Image (cartoon, rainbow, N blue to C red):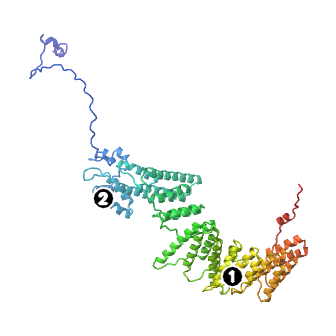
């Protein structure tokens, strides 16, 4: 039976059991009539389809996630904002961030910035950009909100490279960075430079780090100038300040020239730093140009350096004889004085008189009348009519006017000096001497020869006959000595005789000028007569009188008479000068008067005067000039 059943189940056995007629399939529906169909001819390619409207799901890199059931994915882990940790505090922060819109989170960040809660800003921002708004879409930050996040990262210690990566990744949120975004990167670069300056790195390593940092700064700033956004005030201040601290002066100067061009405003610290480094790098002309450009711009014209920096500007200007920079320093001093007068309680600032005198000296050397007037005005404003300027300051002003050729103003200043110190006690007798203090005025009087001398004399004569007559023996002595300087003995003698006609009495300086005029013309006897005359009338000769009389004898090659005058000079209580003794010794050498030479050496030893030698003069004197070659 088993074998039989196996056979029945065998596939080869089944056909033999079936009937010989064909099999039919059982169906409940009649068969359909079908005909073959030909393939249709190819139709022309359709035109390009109309594009779909832009995807509204833009503005956040988290749209590629399943934002209906957000789960952290590998793509999210590699995105801009890291996935926050799953903690209880984080859960509260996430729940809190989901109920805020853009304006609400901005107000919240404002409070956090005021209290410096940088970690909270960072966490809230990271949760907020992953949360959904009212329409069920991820939140879209704007540039201001993103700048708060960058600020938090900066305060938490992120370096410039990390911040720059965050700025570049703002495009994932369809946000364009503005100048404030890049300013945060520049702030990080400034911090890195300060850390390099504070830490004790190796010299080569530190220099390479600074160089790389400066190159990165300049490249980023140039990119902003070329592609945008344009740098704002903060950008210029940060970049220029960084370059100054890094001592890279050339790019700093390049960017400083762009400040007025773009209408940017420098802050006070950067303005002071720019002027300071220009002065320290010995570029007074560049400093002058920079100050002029700032004064010409409406944004920077009110900037004023510190009081101490104004002093430094003035010192550099006086040292380099830069009259324009010196005048700018005086303008800054005037602004400080004006500020002090407007404050309550009033602060009375004043400029040292020595600084004003130095400014007058610079004006005389550079022939700058504007600096002359400005320095005198700042001095009068500083003194506040409580005291008179010192005589030396008056003399500096006279010297300045004389160098400018303004002889009339110089004599007016001399009149002020005489009114202030003519009758004062303890006045230096050489204060009104045309040989020393007033010698620049003498030179100005005889600059054009006798024509200028006659013009000055006529002007003084006119002043002596005015309603308020100005009769000055010091002014006439300048004319008298000027006549002697141009070798006009007749005009000098006539001027001396006209002193009494003008209502003035000759003083010792008048006799000295006349003695000098006779001595220059080798009229030694007349010079001696002038000396005897002034002694007979009771006038006291001074050191200049004896010196001029010695010169008159030396012109006549008479060293013995010159030594006699030296003896009289010592008896009168004056000490011979080194220059006077050297003149006599030189004449003794030329005349081969060895006895007189020994007396000169004794005088030098008695008065502790080191004469030295005159090797070069002796070599020139002993040269044998000949026409034989």
- Work out whether 360 lies above or below 72: below
Where in the figure is residue 396, as x and y percent of width and height? 64, 75
Label disc, if present, on residue 474 of the rendered structure: 1
Q: Is residue 109 left or right of residue 431?
A: left
Does residue 125 appear left or right of residue 569 in this picture? left
The C terminus: image quadrant: bottom right
Toward the top, the furthest residue is 20
Element type at mark 1: helix
Q: From the viewer's perspective, is 312 left or right of 600? A: left
Q: Which residue is painted at 86% across and 81% down in the image?
A: 564
- Residue 437 is labelled as none
| Front residue of 233 and 72 | 233
Snapshot quadrant of residue 549: bottom right
The quadrant holding residue 617 is bottom right
* Badge 2: residue crowd in 10 Å (few <14, some 14–19, many ≥20): few
Q: Nearer the viewer, mark 1 or mark 2?
A: 1
In the image, residue 345 lies at what x, y percent?
Answer: 46, 79
x, y percentage for residue 282?
60, 61
| Residue pointed to by mark 2 | 103
Figure check: 465 above or below 625: below
């Amino acid at each position: 039976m088993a074998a039989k059943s196996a056979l029945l189940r065998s596939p080869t056995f089944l056909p033999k059991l079936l009937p010989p007629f064909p099999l039919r399939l059982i169906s409940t529906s009649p068969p359909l009539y079908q005909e073959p169909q030909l393939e249709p001819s190819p139709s022309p390619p359709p035109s390009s389809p109309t594009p779909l409207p832009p995807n509204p799901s833009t503005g956040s890199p988290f749209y590629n996630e399943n934002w209906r059931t957000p789960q952290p994915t590998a793509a999210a882990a590699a995105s801009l904002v890291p996935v926050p940790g799953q903690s209880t505090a984080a859960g509260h922060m996430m729940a809190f961030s989901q109920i805020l819109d853009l304006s609400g989170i901005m107000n919240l960040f404002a409070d956090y910035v005021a209290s410096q809660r940088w970690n909270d800003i960072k966490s809230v921002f990271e949760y907020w950009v992953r949360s959904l708004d009212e329409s069920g879409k991820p939140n879209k930050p704007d540039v201001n909100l993103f700048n708060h996040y960058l600020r938090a990262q900066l305060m938490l210690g992120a370096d410039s490279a990390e911040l720059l990566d965050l700025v570049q990744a703002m495009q994932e949120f369809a946000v364009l960075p503005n100048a404030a975004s890049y300013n945060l990167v520049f702030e990080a670069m400034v911090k890195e430079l300060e850390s390099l300056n504070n830490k004790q790195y190796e010299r080569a390593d530190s220099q390479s780090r600074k160089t790389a940092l400066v190159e990165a700064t300049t490249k980023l700033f140039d990119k902003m100038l070329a592609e945008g956004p344009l740098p704002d005030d903060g950008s210029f201040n940060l970049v220029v300040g960084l370059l100054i601290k890094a001592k890279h002066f050339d790019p700093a100067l390049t960017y400083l020239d762009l400040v007025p061009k773009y209408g940017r405003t420098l802050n006070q610290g950067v303005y002071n730093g720019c002027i300071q480094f220009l002065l320290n790098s010995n570029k007074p002309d560049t400093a002058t140009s920079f100050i002029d450009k700032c004064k010409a711009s409406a944004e920077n014209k009110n900037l004023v350096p510190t009081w101490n920096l104004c002093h430094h500007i003035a010192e550099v200007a006086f040292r380099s004889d830069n009259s324009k920079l010196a005048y700018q320093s005086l303008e800054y001093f005037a602004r400080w004085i004006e500020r002090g007068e407007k404050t309550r309680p009033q602060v009375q600032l004043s400029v040292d008189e020595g600084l004003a005198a130095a400014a007058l000296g610079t004006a005389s050397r550079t022939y700058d009348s504007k600096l002359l007037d400005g320095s005198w005005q700042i001095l009068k404003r500083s003194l506040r009519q409580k005291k008179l300027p010192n005589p030396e300051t008056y003399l500096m002003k006279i010297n300045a006017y004389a160098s400018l050729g303004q002889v009339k103003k110089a004599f007016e200043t001399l009149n002020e000096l005489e009114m202030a110190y003519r009758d004062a006690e303890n006045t230096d007798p050489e204060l009104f001497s045309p040989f020393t203090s007033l010698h620049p005025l003498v030179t100005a009087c005889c600059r054009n020869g006798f024509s200028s001398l006659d013009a000055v004399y006529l002007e003084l004569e006119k002043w002596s006959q005015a309603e308020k007559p100005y009769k000055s023996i010091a002014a006439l002595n300048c004319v008298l000595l000027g006549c002697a300087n141009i070798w006009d003995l007749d005009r000098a003698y006539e001027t001396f005789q006209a002193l009494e006609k003008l209502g003035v009495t000759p003083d010792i300086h008048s006799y000295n000028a006349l003695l000098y005029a006779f001595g220059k013309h080798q009229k030694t006897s007349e010079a001696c007569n002038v000396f005897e005359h002034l002694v007979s009338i009771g006038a006291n000769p001074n050191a200049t009188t004896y010196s001029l009389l010695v010169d008159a004898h030396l012109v006549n090659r008479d060293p013995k008479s010159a030594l006699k005058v030296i003896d009289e000079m010592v008896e009168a209580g004056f000490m011979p000068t080194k220059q006077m003794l050297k003149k006599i010794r030189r004449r003794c050498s030329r005349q081969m008067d060895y006895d007189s030479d020994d007396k000169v050496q004794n005088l030098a030893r008695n008065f502790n005067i080191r004469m030295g030698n005159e090797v070069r003069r002796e070599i020139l004197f002993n040269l044998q000039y000949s026409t034989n070659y």
